[in-house]
Amino acid sequence: GNLETQVEAVSTDELGAVASAFNNLVGQLKRTEQARKHLVADVAHELRTPLSIINGQLELIEQGIKASDIENLLPIHDEVFRLTQLVNDLHQLTIAEAGKLVLNKQLVDMPSLVERIVENFQMATEDNGVSVKFGTDVEELSIPVDRNRLTQVLINLIGNAVRYTPEGGTVEVIVARRDEYAEIKVKDTGVGIAPDHQAHIFDRFYRADEDRTRDTGGTGLGLAIAKEFVEAHGGNIELSSTVGVGSAFTVHLPLPKSNMKGA
Ligand code: ADP
């Protein structure tokens, strides 16, 4: 063809590219804006229940219907504790989601760290009929991690495993070494998670059973935080679960090059 039609063809293409880039950008902005609106709505929803409980209790005390003794202040303390936890979790999560998490990495021996956390759970769960066990196939496996962040991840995963496992059940925490990564598996004989829920379980405030899990404790942010923290280390978390049988959450953390098999 002649030069003119060529030029025209190019510029139409270019215009098309600019238009589609623009559309993508607008799409992205809309999604970000939607995500922000959702977050605000979610947080408002999560704050409402504890605040209305605190409000109600305080009114009863003010009207002299309840004494302002320890007994009647306890539910208020519980809810304030919950709110504090929620705000702290949200803070951590928003920092992580913005990619602004600063990891304070140091070499940490995985089996020792995990065993110590399991021991703490064993003491705490002595009376509630769920046994927590530790196992490993390596004596020593040091990898560079942010000790506090990783501890938080494990507390969230083991805490959930204990929480969603009925009396008489077992939670097993196993550290293993694979070719290129360290593996920490938290396996329970609990209620399990239905396939429909599995895809969403790491979303903030997502609960497989809203009614059941609201009063069992967590902020609904535990898994979202665990995922962000592990990904910040270059790792990932895998879930496999069967309703009525149990769940296994597996954390993979990359080994430093010098620690890989054969290196
Ligand atoms: P929550 O504070 O509600 O526990 P999480 O983010 O830690 O929030 O977990 C999200 C949801 O995933 C829980 O509400 C629960 O429905 C489900 N879940 C998490 N861990 C387990 C588990 N080990 N067994 C069964 N369900 C689980």
Image: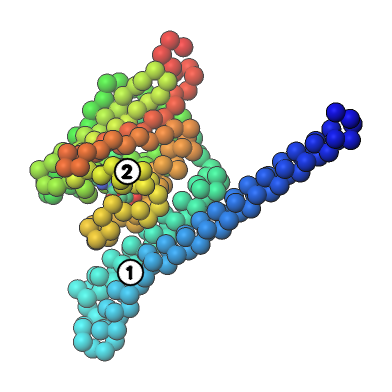
Tag 1's secondary structure? helix
**Residue furthest toward the right?**
3
Which color scheme does this rendered protein use? rainbow
Mark 1, residues whose alpha carbon is within 10 Å: few (<14), some, or many (≥20)? Answer: some
Direction from residue 11 to residue 228 in the image, left or right: left
Alpha carbon of mark 2 to alpha carbon of mark 1: how far?
A: 27 Å
- Name the residue that disc number 1 marks: 50
The location of residue 85, given as percent across then percent down, is 37, 58
Q: Nearer the viewer, residue 99 or 13?
A: 13
Q: Which residue is mark 2?
A: 198
| Mark 2, other Cα within 10 Å: few <14 / some 14–19 / many ≥20 | some
Q: Determine whether the residue tagged by mark 2 lies in a helix, strand or loop.
A: helix
Q: Is residue 60 visible?
A: yes
Q: Residue furthest top?
A: 262
Q: Is residue 74 left or right of residue 203?
A: left
Image quadrant holding the N terminus, namely top right
Q: Hey, what amino acid is under mark 1?
A: Pro
Which residue type does callout 2 highlight?
Gln
* Residue 118 seen in this snapshot: no
> Residue at (28%, 58%) from the top-left corner?
210
- Residue at (35%, 53%) from the top-left corner? 206
x and y percent of residue 32 in the render? 56, 54
The vertical placement of 62 against 161, above or below, is: below
Question: In the rendering, at what x and y percent does residue 211 appear?
Answer: 24, 61
| Position of 120 relative to 184 (above/below) | below
- Compared across the picture, whether 142 is left or right of 128 comes to right
Image point 19% across, 45% down: which residue? 191
